[in-house]
Image (cartoon, helix red, strand yellow):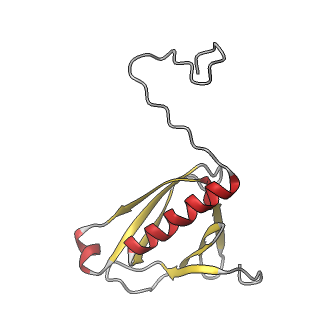
Amino acid sequence: MKDVQMDIIWRERKRNIFGMPLSFTVYSLTEERLFIETGLFNSVENEVRLYRILDVQLRRSFMQKIFGIGTIAISSSDKSLGDFVLKNVKKPKVVKELISKNVEIQRELKRVVNREIISGNDVSVDIDGDGIPD
């Protein structure tokens, strides 16, 4: 990621339980992607395109609240990364809102629609009207 010029909106190291950035995990956010880089000698960089993020959740334990950090759980449709967490980030409410806002922007730009199916006991619901239960 350091070789390519990207406009990074947010970048931070994973922190320990006391809020200190003593980790070899770095989270980065651009307008289109979220990166997770781990490792010192052998590093792995994962990325998820923001339009693939389905849900963003903030989790904070008592200790995390004391030290001003939190964990952001992300549910995505990305095949390789799937669901993942950004653990022990500083100002977690701000970061969660930043991610959510940019996810919505990218979903609108890419015209991605997420269908949520809500049904009771009837398993033979025909959502698209083609005569075949979905």
> Looking at the image, which residue is at 65% across and 65% down?
47
In percent of width and height, residue 33 lies at 64, 67
> Looking at the image, which residue is at 31% across and 83% down?
18
In which quadrant of the rendered image does the N terminus lie? bottom right
> Looking at the image, which residue is at 48% across and 82% down?
23
> Looking at the image, which residue is at 57% across and 24% down?
127
Asked if residue 93 lies left or right of residue 47, the reply is: left
In percent of width and height, residue 7 lies at 67, 81
Snapshot quadrant of residue 37: bottom right
In percent of width and height, residue 62 lies at 22, 70
In percent of width and height, residue 124 lies at 51, 15
Between 112 and 36, the one lying in front of the other is: 112
Q: Tell how many labels.
A: 0
Asked if residue 27 lies left or right of residue 3, the reply is: left
| Residue 24 can be seen, yes or no | no
| Residue 71 can be seen, yes or no | yes
Q: Is residue 63 above or below residue 49?
A: below
Q: Is residue 115 above or below residue 60?
A: above
In which quadrant of the rendered image does the C terminus lie? top right
Snapshot quadrant of residue 113: top right
Between 71 and 119, the one lying in front of the other is: 119
Snapshot quadrant of residue 68: bottom left
